[in-house]
Every structure is written in C-alpha cells, then in structure tokens.
Image (spheres, helix red, strand yellow):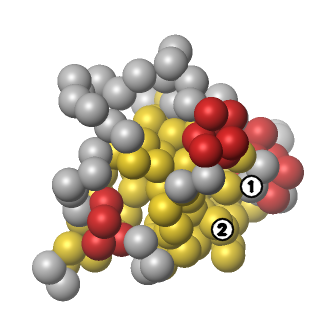
Amino acid sequence: MTAPIETHALTEAECLDLLRTEPIGRLVFTENALPAIRPMHFVLDGRDVLVRTVEDSWARRVVDTVVAFEVDRIDDASHTGWSVVLLGTVTAVTDIDTLVQVTDFRNRPWVPSHRDRYLRIRPGQLTGRRLSFAPV
C-alpha cells in the first residue's frame, strides 16, 4: 500500500527558491484570441522573470499585457513534485545595465538565432503547490 499524496501551498519565498532550480519555464499568453504556450529559458531578477527572444516575433505583441509563467518539476515514479505559477505584466527590457546584468551566456537558447530582445514579467501574483507523501 502506498502512502497518500498531499498538496501543500508554497510561500512566496519557497516559490522563488524553486524557480531558481530550473532553467526552463512555460510562458502562457493570448495569440489571435487563443491560448498560446512557449517553453522559454529564463532568469530571475529579484522577483521578476526575464526571458530572451527574437525581435520580430510574438514577443512584441505581449508587451503591456498580462501573462502567466509556469515552472515545475514532477517525478513520474513517485507522483511527487511542485509547480509555481506567476501572473504578471510584461515589459520590454531596454536598460543597458540590466541587459548586461541578466545576460548569461551559459544559458543559451536551444534554437539557434539572434535573440536580442528581453522581456520582464513583473509578478502581480506568485503561487505554488508541492505534491508530497502524507505522513502516516
């Protein structure tokens, strides 16, 4: 008999700690009145998520809109893991000091292209859940 699984809400500090452990998240936005999801490399700048993309893309259309950004880690074998969801507004990053600070050449995009546009997602809401075994 396996132990039951419990869901626990995470604090904001726990959410931020978990976000720092993963390099890939999912950006959720509206495109042509339909939901769209893009896996993205990201970095944290305080509480903000920064993503890097190409200039001529859907990214231009999400500036000044509300999006969701989700990161998770799930263990299929044990059915345990966590998920963090950030809801926030997107702005374009143009300040050169910020761009130098957040550009990490070790975190290169998988798709070869010139990705010189950075977007900042400033969270209005940051929530998370952890799935773990219940004490017996």
What amino acid does circle 2 point to? Pro
- Residue 8 visible here: no
Left or right of residue 91, residue 59 in this image: left
Residue furthest to the left in view is 32
**In this view of the protein, which residue sits in the foreground, 73 or 18?**
18
If the image is split into quadrants, where does the N terminus sit?
top right
Q: Secondary structure at mark 2?
A: strand
- Residue 43 visible here: yes
Residue 37 point in image, percent of width and height: 29, 58
Q: Are marks 2 and 1 in contact (CB under 8 Å)?
A: yes
The image quarter containing residue 133 is top right
Residue at the spot of label 1: 47
Residue 87 point in image, percent of width and height: 57, 71
The residue depicted at 57 percent of the width and 72 percent of the height is 88
Left or right of residue 42, residue 29 in this image: left
103 in relation to 116, above or below: above
Q: Residues within 10 Å of mark 2 (few under 14, many from 20)?
A: some
80 in relation to 48, above or below: above
Residue 48 point in image, percent of width and height: 67, 56
Whichever of labels 2 and 1 marks the residue nearer the N terminus, that label is 1
**In this view of the protein, which residue sits in the foreground, 77 or 13?**
13
Residue 29 point in image, percent of width and height: 34, 70
The residue depicted at 23 percent of the width and 62 percent of the height is 58
Q: Secondary structure at mark 1?
A: loop
Q: Which mark is residue 119?
A: none
The image quarter containing residue 36 is bottom left
Left or right of residue 72, residue 8 in this image: right
Residue at the spot of label 2: 123
**In this view of the protein, which residue sits in the foreground, 135 or 71?**
71
The residue depicted at 20 percent of the width and 55 percent of the height is 56
Disc 2/disc 1 C-alpha distance (Å): 7 Å
The image quarter containing residue 10 is bottom right
